[in-house]
Image (tube, coloured by chain):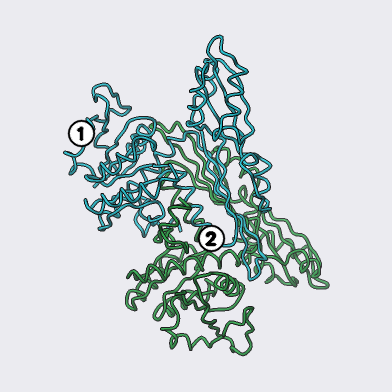
Chain colours: A cyan, B green
Amino acid sequence: MSIKIGIAGYGNLGRGVEAAVTNAPDMELVGIFTRRDPATVKTATGAKVYKWEDAKSMKDDIDVMILCGDSANDLPEQTPEMSQYFCCIDSFDTHANIPTHFAKVDEVCKKAGTLSMISVGWDPGMFSLNRIYSQAILPNGNDYTFWGKGVSQGHSDAIRRIEGVADARQYTVPVQSALDKVRAGENPELTTREKHTRECFVVAKEGADKAKIENEIKTMPNYFADYDTTVTFISQEELDRDHKGIPHGGMVFRTGVTGLNGEEKHVIEYKLTLESNPGFTSSVLTAYARAAYRMHNEGTVGCKTVFDVAPTYLHPDTADEQRAHLL
Amino acid sequence: MSIKIGIAGYGNLGRGVEAAVTNAPDMELVGIFTRRDPATVKTATGAKVYKWEDAKSMKDDIDVMILCGDSANDLPEQTPEMSQYFCCIDSFDTHANIPTHFAKVDEVCKKAGTLSMISVGWDPGMFSLNRIYSQAILPNGNDYTFWGKGVSQGHSDAIRRIEGVADARQYTVPVQSALDKVRAGENPELTTREKHTRECFVVAKEGADKAKIENEIKTMPNYFADYDTTVTFISQEELDRDHKGIPHGGMVFRTGVTGLNGEEKHVIEYKLTLESNPGFTSSVLTAYARAAYRMHNEGTVGCKTVFDVAPTYLHPDTADEQRAHLL
């Protein structure tokens, strides 16, 4: 019996989930739900497209709904809404607002008897898992998270909002010398500037003042002012040709000590090198949909995060097979 | 209320657990159980030492017993024995025999109402976790596990059994060019010889035939014959001075693809660099003792592995704190 999946929202993430579910041997894609006119949405696999409002009438046809909206505008409303009818998975990634989002979804789930998992992906998600495992194992130590090299959509958007900018792509790049110090177990104290640089590729509109654009980028508070930032002006053709992908990744480190007097040093490193940020994130969402289905079948309800999911639930093999082949 | 811990067996691993429990804010070390005469055992912290046979009479004084014996001779008997009275944690690492060991411990636990976790450590353990998470996320891909640079006790012991050898230390070393290919996502097919080399430091007895020893090492089936092996003869003083530590570590990789036609490549790497193998392993055992205590308090019984433990149980903070600070 396959797990019946719905996808709510059809952007980069939705397309990624469509591919992951299609390739999963134990899942079946029931349909994609959109706020646009379904007739205007062409899916990569020919999956059926439904109106958003039709979802609730399909309560019994779908085991898990994977939400593919954005964290700023969509998920704070959509996850509680859909959790009334379905077990849901979302990738809510506004770290500071996780407790509020959790409480809202938990209340709905407990009332409805559903199980929803929030903040699934790689950060929050796989990176969070590495933080909690590593802190639990090495309680006496330091955490470091580096991102990149990868595209930050938020920073790219911020540049595009500047007057005279036609298009832009921003890469977050970890500083090699900082990485080297952490890997060597030196436990450095690192400022924001010492951890990452920002590389901006910008297409200026005709006649725009490039010096002014560059200055506006480099001095932009929150986004760029605290970083060493480089700005390179290129043509739209170059941007489309050389900067089309959405690579990302990064590293989570824990450096800590064991021994009665902390005499033994250890370094734990978890590193992701991703050619496609939405492709990988949607694969994580899909694995957690399997876990949500299994845990809900066992009677678990409420809001959960990756911290609450035993790894056995994620993998399609039986527990016996997992112990025999993976342990 | 602190978690009351017992330690069964007092070698390198037992001393490591003693340190980890002593440094944990939510644990208390009740005592160490030994098959030797307790009067002959001097503990690093002054912890009390009891006769092995006294353990069962202390059933109500100990929440979790951490077993620190070896996988070949001790744990197959000791974990089932102790699981009659206690929730136990062991580091059983004979991969091929895990299903048998699991079944035996599971039967005892279910009869006694205890919860025991087997095969806890880093391989099996943290490496297994990375294998299961990464396979679940990237079902279409390849796994690679590399060990080292680190001391293999089993290989060191095998050399010591050769006639004319006074002492020896063997390091397992991953081959850099193989690592580079895996990290680049080339998905190489690697033979045993292509993945690791073996470096042996040997102290020969006076008058021993060094050429014969070297040849015996390099042609030893299972241990060395399938590897490029180097043998370096040194003095006992050099061995004691330069090869005293027990470093280890290694890497688990998953390279895989996402996208409808596998068009996006990803690399997941988990890397441990450990100054002390028993120091780190005992820290993992101690974190899982916390999880066993909490899960047993919720009514869970039977044999478990790291695959069955949701990460939230490992970390001393509350679930609210974990979500706020680690997610």
Q: Quadrant of residue A3?
A: top left
Q: Chain of mark 2?
A: B
| Image point (35%, 46%), residue name | A101
Tell me if B64 is positioned left or right of B172 in this view.
left
On the image, the x and y values in percent for residue B122 come to 53, 60
* Residue B77 or residue A69, whichever sits in front: A69
Tell me if A78 is positioned left or right of A182 in this view.
left
Relative to B97, is A3 above or below?
above
Tell me if A189 is positioned left or right of B87 in this view.
right
On the image, the x and y values in percent for residue A316 come to 35, 50
* Residue A216 or residue B187, whichever sits in front: A216
Q: Quadrant of residue B233?
A: bottom right
Relative to A274, is A252 above or below?
below
Q: Quadrant of residue A31?
A: top left
| Image point (51%, 76%), residue name | B28
- Disc 2 residue type (three-letter): Trp
Pointer 1 local density, CA inside 10 Å: few below 14, some 14–19, many at least 20: few
* Residue B312 or residue A292, whichever sits in front: B312
Look at the image and tell me whether residue B147 can be seen. Answer: no
* Residue B68 or residue A281, whichever sits in front: A281
On the image, the x and y values in percent for residue B216 come to 70, 63
Pointer 2 local density, CA inside 10 Å: few below 14, some 14–19, many at least 20: many
Q: Are marks 1 and 2 on the same chain?
A: no
Instruction: Find the residue positioned furthest to the top.
Output: A207
Residue position marked by numbered label 2 in the rendering? B122
Residue position marked by numbered label 1 in the rendering? A53
Total labels drawn: 2
On the image, the x and y values in percent for residue A281 come to 42, 39
